[in-house]
Amino acid sequence: MRRQVRASVLLAAALAAYGNAPAAQEQDPVLRRRPGAESVPDLPPIDPTAVAPPTRAQPRETLPIPDRWRLVDAVGVQTRWWDPYNQNTLKADRPIFGDWFVNVGLVSDTVYELRGVPTPVAPQGAAPGSVDAFGRVPQNSFVQNLITSFALIKGDTAFMPPTLEFRVTPVFSYNRVSVREDRVVRIDPLAGHIRTDGHVGLQEAFVDYHLHNVSDRYDFDSVRLGIQPVNADFRGFLFQDQQLGVRLFGTRANNIWQYNLAWFRRLEKDTNSGLNDLGKRLRDDDVFFANAYRQDFLVHGYTAQAIVAYNRNREGNDTLFYNKNGFLERPASIGYERPTDYDVVYVGFNGDGHFGRFNLTNTVYGAIGNVSANPFTSRTRAEPAKVRAWFAALEPSVDIDWVRLRGQALFASGDRDPYDAKATGFDAIFENPQFAGAETSYWIRQPVPLIGGGGVAISGRNGILNSLRSSKEQGQSNFINPGTLLLGFGADADVLPELRLSANVNHIWFARRGVVEALRNQPLVSRSIGWDTSISAVYRPTFIQNIAFRASGAALFGGAGFSNLFDTTGGKVFYSILFNLILTY
């Protein structure tokens, strides 16, 4: 009996499949819901007046537009020349003609600073309140820089490097400095205690030509000729500047490898602004370097760099060079003031990246070469010295939520005996270190003069090395120096999305005492310079970099060696208070 019922069901299914499906579905609603069974809907009759659908043979109908960058016009997007974050022809969002773009930039950088710096008393006489060789320390300065940038770029900038770029960046600078002692701002003691000055410097003027692409991922080779920014390493320890030169650069292996080959002939700098001075002849000072970067070296997130640099200086036969304030720059007013030439080769390894939540920046350099004359011994004839110096810096850090904790250590070798034929003090080509608080640090920002030991600074402005140079802008490198040792720690805290606080505490020493003792003709009881403490805040009210306000305060608590060199018994406090407003378009 069961077999007969099953056969009847199968027969009904077969009839539904071979043309009797509608009748079967009407009789048995279960069959209409059976998986896999589909009903054919009743289609409306064809309208004979309707337009026939297009056939494959018909041409495609399109609506022409000027270019792909103006697609957004169709949906009502409007350009605003004053808005750098939306469609803006002045910010290279769309071409001005063909595939040529223009990019215009404008930056206002305003700095007001109050500082206390060890200040010498002029030999012509002391101002009221000055004692012995040390005068009153308060100073203040105001600097206004207007940075303008104009670039003309050819190419499809969205998918590949530009084919051709022309860029010009003039900077208009005004500065005013007020001090309490004579002969600080100018060599003439009758010039007063206030100096105002202005300068127009050309910081960029180059052409960048895209030679060719070497892969379908746009690895490339390019050449750049003219005044251009250069940074030989990650943190600006060796050579960070804007100088005249030619640079061949490019990438390989999907940007994993990057390289630079460069030659720079150094421009003279303006004394008070530090900007390029095209009104002076080129210096006889050449820098050649080659470096290579490898991303994801050993682990993902860590970039390694190897570099070889050669600094050739031939300013030993030049006449004496005085800056615009009347002070001797070359040769440095130290020892016998003997002009020098030097050839120095730097070999270095740098790294920057992270290992999980731990970050690491590391640098090591060796310097090998020779100096034509020793300022301590070359009185009547040149007595060359061999350069054998080295440098190392390390910054490990860890991120804990919105706080980064940092450690920082730096060592630059010093010269033990200035009277031998060895120059073992490390000096850079043109340093601008982004390290240990950078320009918010007292010791890095302030040029502290070696009072009574020569017309040189222990460390230069925006420099960390105790190199005893007249200045890093117009002076020569000096490899007979006491060296530098720094140990410290710091922290960065993003307390708000628009507010970052940073603090640093560093202890600084001379690496060697011999050079300083010889210049001051006195023994040092200690190599300790002291504790450099600083705190800073950066506030960005719009969460972006177009408006940034920075305030910082720093103080130097002198150690025993610093007390030997400077009169700190009269309650003098060495400090730096800085206010900086940056507006960017």
Image: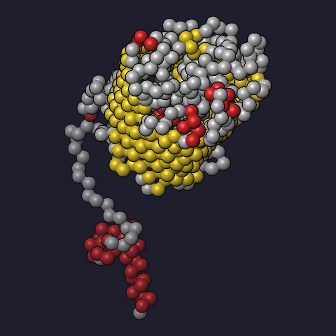
Image side of residue 215 versus residue 557, left or right = right
Q: How many marks?
A: 0
Residue drawn 53% across the image and 8% down it = 280
Query: Does residue 110 appear to the left or right of 441 in the view shown?
Result: left
In terms of image quadrants, where is residue 284? top right
Seen in the picture, residue 23 relative to 581 is either above or below; the reply is below
Q: In front here: 561 or 386?
A: 561
- Percent across and percent down for residue 354 are 56, 49
Q: Quadrant of the N terminus?
A: bottom left
| Residue 446 in view here | yes
Q: Of all residues shown, which one is farthest toward the bottom?
A: 1
Name the quadrant of the C terminus.
top left
Q: Residue at x 67, y 36 (%)?
A: 512
* Residue 29 spot, x, y in % from top left: 29, 75
Whether residue 264 can be seen here: no
The location of residue 386, given as percent across then percent down, is 77, 25
Q: Is residue 501 above or below residue 112?
A: below
Residue located 55% across and 53% down the image = 358
Q: Position of residue 495 (x, y in %)?
A: 36, 50
Q: Seen in the image, is 487 located left or right of residue 277?
A: right
Q: Quadrant of residue 245?
A: top right
